[in-house]
Amino acid sequence: QVQLAESGGGLVQAGGSLRLSCAASGSIFRINAMGWYRQVPGKQRDLVAAIIYGGSTNYADSVKGRFTITRDNAKITVYLLMNSLKPEDTGVYYCNVRSVGYDGVAGDYWGQGTQVTVSS
């Protein structure tokens, strides 16, 4: 089992910045991918950014050039630096980790979500 602890959400004015953090702990043999998803009321949870095992990154078109995803392997933590925030970036941000445990079982884990609100 893997536990995720998110932090860093909040209220910010348009043009501002926030950094989200998500620390993973538990039975983790290998991390296959870590990422952030955003959900707004009435809509599905969409990928914002992800970083996979080899270090490659993937971003939603709407955040390219503004958001940066990084990870600290020693701390098993993923970060999302969000610059030039826009009101449309508002939503609940969920951390996602895909990992393999020491028992060889793969899992897909979600954080509890952190609210990001960007005011105009």
Image (cartoon, helix red, strand yellow):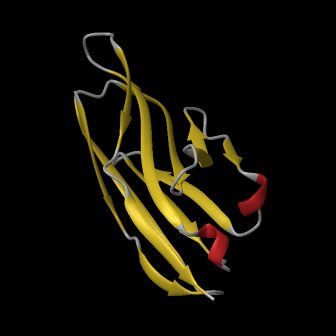
Q: Is residue 45 above or below residue 54?
A: below
Which of 53/95 is in front? 95
Give the left or right position of residue 100, taking residue 59 as reference.
Answer: left
Tell me the residue at 55%/68% (across/down): 81
Tell me the residue at 45%/60% (across/down): 92
Quadrant (top left, top right, bottom left, bottom right) of the C terminus: bottom right
Examine the image and state in which quarter residue 115 appears. bottom left
Q: Is residue 101 above or below residue 51?
A: above
Q: Name, please, the residue furthest toward the front.
A: 42
Examine the image and state in which quarter residue 103 appears. top left
Residue 4 drawn at (x, y percent): 29, 45
Which of 2/39 is in front? 39
Give the left or right position of residue 7, taking residue 3 as reference.
Answer: right
Residue 44 drawn at (x, y percent): 57, 43
Which of 90/83 is in front? 90
Examine the image and state in which quarter residue 66 appears. bottom right
Quadrant (top left, top right, bottom left, bottom right) of the N terminus: top left
Tell me the residue at 44%/65% (across/down): 20
Tell me the residue at 71%/62% (across/down): 63
